[in-house]
Amino acid sequence: MSNLLNISSSPHVRDKSSTKSIMWDVFLALMPATLFGVWNFGYKAAVLIVACIATSVLTEYIWQKAMKLPLTVSDGSAAVTGLLLALNLSSTFPVWMAMLGSVFAIIIVKQLFGGLGQNFMNPALGARCFLMVSFAGKMTSFTYDGVTGATPLALIKNGDNSTNLLDMFLGTIGGTIGETSTLALLIGAAYLLIRKVITWRIPVCYIATFAIFALIFGGHGFDMTYLAKELCGGGLMLGAFFMATDYVTSPITAKGQIVFGILLGILTGVFRIYGASAEGVSYAIIICNLLVPLIERVTLPVPFGKEGIKDGK
């Protein structure tokens, strides 16, 4: 008899994936961008990355021990949070501030809401926004090859198009540790897609919507070079593939993920083009994280035979 005809207790569809395997897949997928960031910015980037990961893991361990909760540090979620936070920081950002951000991410955003699976926003992005509010000057200071200057997106926003597109794609530019190399991020994204850790819906809808928005409202007409620079800069690829796709803070329904991606693209476009900052990815994702319950409620499939499903309609 076919296994499909057997009756068993739920869940009826099982998968071999676990929280641990998923988290370490994400960690591994971030390695190309991480290694390139260390090569691009030097030992200071490596120190910052290690400090954020170690602080995040240690904070989760101490908190769970103190609260007499089950220890979950081995699942990799704290390590991924620390790594993502570090990749969203400048290599010259003070280490103690980065460690403070790691503590905020784990305790305030994650543990106080019940731990992994209960947090209402991405912990790394929550910490990044906390650091942006607390230490705005340090968060917006970027040094590359010993020279402090604006990021390529900030230059573009101010009308300076001198940044080379190939440099932006490869990553030999200033910015945060993990956002500069589009190539490295796409390699990691391909790994996640091949491993089926993430689906195409959120990142593709996000990037496509933002691209359309930028072409229509960016003020550069249908300039493909301008669009390519916008796509390669400002952490859009890092956010689209590695943070917007967070299982806990993104919709579980297929339609919901499409709506989520479209909203992300629109908000990022509004923040970048009409806002004071040239970035916008972090705030767009956090705002959409807050909208996830509403998105899921609207897009949740109605079970057959319930609430108006009659005569096959």
Image (tube, helix red, strand yellow):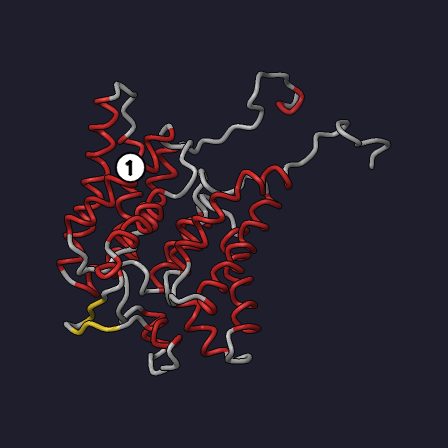
**Residue 200 in the image: x percent, y percent?**
52, 52
Nearer to me, 161 or 141: 141
Left or right: residue 179 compared with residue 257: left
Q: Which residue is mark 1?
A: 106
Please say if 277 is above or below 32. below
Please say if 218 is above or below 300. below
Please say if 3 is above or below 124. above
Disc 1 packing (10 Å; few <14; some 14–19; many ≥20): many
> Which residue appears at 57% of the width and 16% of the height?
9
> Which residue appears at 41% of the width and 60% of the height?
280
**Residue 265 in the image: x percent, y percent?**
52, 59
Left or right: residue 229 compared with residue 288: left
Q: Secondary structure at mark 1?
A: helix
**Residue 161 in the image: x percent, y percent?**
37, 82
Left or right: residue 276 compared with residue 8: left
Q: On the rendered image, what quadrant is the C terminus found in?
A: top right
> Which residue appears at 24% of the width and 43% of the height?
102
Q: Amino acid at mark 1?
A: Ile
Left or right: residue 200 compared with residue 171: right
Question: Does residue 189 show up?
Answer: no
